[in-house]
Amino acid sequence: MLTVQNVTKRFGSFTALEDINLEFGKGVYGLLAPNGAGKTTLMKMIVTLLFPTKGRILCDGKEILSMGESYREKIGYLPQEFGYYRNDSPRQYLRYLGALKGLERRAAEVRIDGLLEKVGLADVKDKKMKKFSGGMVQRVGIAQALLGNPEILVLDEPTAGLDPKERARFRNLISEFSKDRTVILSTHIVSDIESVANRIVMLKDHSVYCDTDCSSLCGMMGGKVFECSVPQKDADSFEMSHLVISRREETGQTHFRFAQDGEKGLPPQAKPVQPDLEDVFLYIYRED
Amino acid sequence: MRVFICQLKRIFRAPFFLGLLAVFLAFDLYLVFSEASGHKNDWENCRRSVNMVNSVAEETGTKINSTDFKKKFAVVLDSHKRDLKSFYHQKTGKESDDLSVMLDNLEGNIYQMTRGEKNRLYDDTTVLNMENILQNRFGVYRNTDFKKDGETYIHEEKLEGFQAEFIRKNSAALQSRVKEIETDGEEDELYFPGNMCRTHGFLYGILFRALVFESALLGVLIMMYIVNFEFMHGTQALAYSSRRGRKLATNQFGAAFISGLLVPALLMAVVLPAYFALFNFSNLWNVSVSSPLNVEMSGIGFFPVITWTRMTVLQYLWATIGIAFALQAVFCLLAFAVAVFFRNNYAGFIIYAILSMGIIMIPERLPWSTPLPVITAANPFTAWKNCGSWLALSEPTLTYPTYFPVLFLLWGAIAAVVIFFGVRRFRRADL
């Protein structure tokens, strides 16, 4: 169990996170918030790259900063900005990281081959990474995060640069991996966590806004999400007067999905629909 | 251990490491072969002179005042005089017993000689010059009163306070050492005459100075490259969140430090054997470096090499090598100290270069009413500048017997303190 206890983080006069209290047990936790909300800051504190200004982070009751190596060997981390050694192949790169993670050489070789197979890079395992696309590099990053078979996996924007097929493969990988493990992942691609996350943590104004499961979160928006079609000539004025979630042009008509509190001003042709996580995200962060 | 080996491999695979090593080796070997080839002018050839003196020593021994030496040297001298006469007759068709006439005429025709003929002339000239040098060797020390010279200097420059006392003390120590040279037999030991052979000036003043500079440059580059490697590649988040964590810096330091010490070893392992293969010292390893024959032009005029204590050629060579390695260790430690504060290689290197130039200039700008100029001159950069005068008197105002112990203690302590604070800062830094 990973416990974030009254954690505040300040950078000079700027407060990135204020009085955060969270608990992460086994399962997948989606960290959802817009840019600058403090997701990366929280994740970096969990992996000991940053130190809390106040409060502490505990792993099974012990403070992670005092645990040292015994804590860090439980972690797998994929940062948002992921650096690599251009002249290394994925295999060489993972070998080095395997050494840093304290893996025994032979066990690391077997694991590396298996992981590269899982992320679809077995064919290029000995090619230099400077020739890779962004998506291929990201897959190497995912592989290195899983390399040490970590108990706690922290992934910051893991699907950035991945195409839909790769994102689907990633979701399956995480689902498979998350049995009896803690996975914390942050993303802007709501659909990535909608199907895999057991709990969603949303940050707003540098604090925890909510920490609940997906269905409860979507339930908060019950009766607030609608769809309707309006003539194209009225589409722009409609968009300006409503919180539009999505817009689709059809022949002569514009189809809108939008959120609204209450029925005042609701177009007669609007029909309520089942809200999803993206609806929730756009509604909660509508002022940002 | 695996992490440490990974860092070492990274250093050895770095293009700048092999590239610069090759360039430095090529340059040093060029220096050696250039000195050996006698390109400088046609009237002298240091290598032939050195090898000639060494071969004379093989026949005569090295104790100049011994009866055995005098007898055998007379035989060698006579042999070369006859050879010179024969050569003179061969080239000019004339006969002469006047050595200066023969030498003037032959040297005037040197452009028309073959390489073999020039070598013959060099050999004869070396032995003939040796006769004069050996006879006049007592003038190097016995006519000099360093204590009196020190007082004269103090009076003329109107010095007082700490500086006057420092010079007085050094002059007294120098006079005492000179007395020792006169009484313990160093004065009567054969050595490579400085004006003909230039062994000390070239080997220690030029070659070792180049070796120390090249080693320092490469050592500093290695240290900055490895210590900041993760930051320069943007991989610090992965590296320092791993199980090894921030202790990775220890492996990086260890690998860079050992590689830094390997650099002078590699350079010396190639360059010094090349030098000694061309310049034969085999019969003169056990003579004193402070022999009165070891007089060359230095920054303070023609000055003998006077070591603070008796040292043979071999001992002096090993001591120089040891000091070079110790200085390299200090350069590497200072580079680490800069690297932990400046997490950018380019900025770190520029800062290091500026600091080194500044540290060299500081002693000259400090007041001599205090010991500060003496203390601050005990730094690795000034030591490098004075390469060629190590363990001996050079700048009369700044050198003293405990120069190197003071240097290593002081700069070891400075590096340790800066590193301590740097590492502590890194351990608590947000990454």
Image: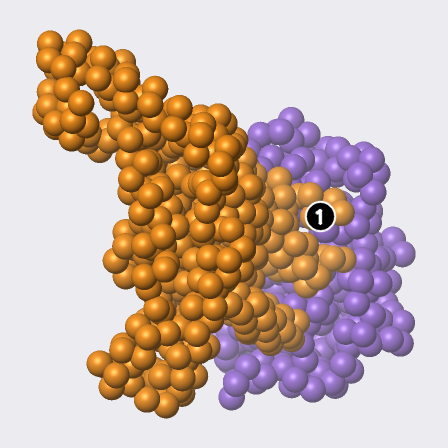
Question: Between A254 and B179, which is closer to the camera in this rendering?
Answer: B179
Query: Badge 1 sits on which subunit?
Result: B
Residue type, numbered disc 1: Val
Q: Position of residue B170 (x, y in %)?
A: 43, 73
Left or right: B386, with A216 as reference point? left
* Residue at the (62%, 49%) spot, across then down: B258
Q: Quadrant of residue B133?
A: top left
Question: Between B346 and B218, which is closer to the camera in this rendering?
Answer: B218
Up the image or down, B101 lies above or below A97; here it is above
Label 1: state its secondary structure. helix
Up the image or down, B374 lies above or below B238; here it is below
Q: Position of residue A49 (x, y in %)?
A: 65, 68
Q: Which residue is mark 1?
A: B3
Can residue A223 be seen here? no
Question: Between A114 and B326, which is closer to the camera in this rendering?
Answer: B326
Q: Which chain is purple?
A: A
User: In this structure image, what is the colour of chain B?
Assistant: orange
| Quadrant of the rendering where the N terminus of chain A is positioned | bottom right
Give the class, few, some or many, for how many residues have Cα within 10 Å of label 1's Cα (few <14, many ≥20): many
Left or right: B427, with B16 as reference point? right
* Residue at the (28%, 51%) spot, across then down: B297
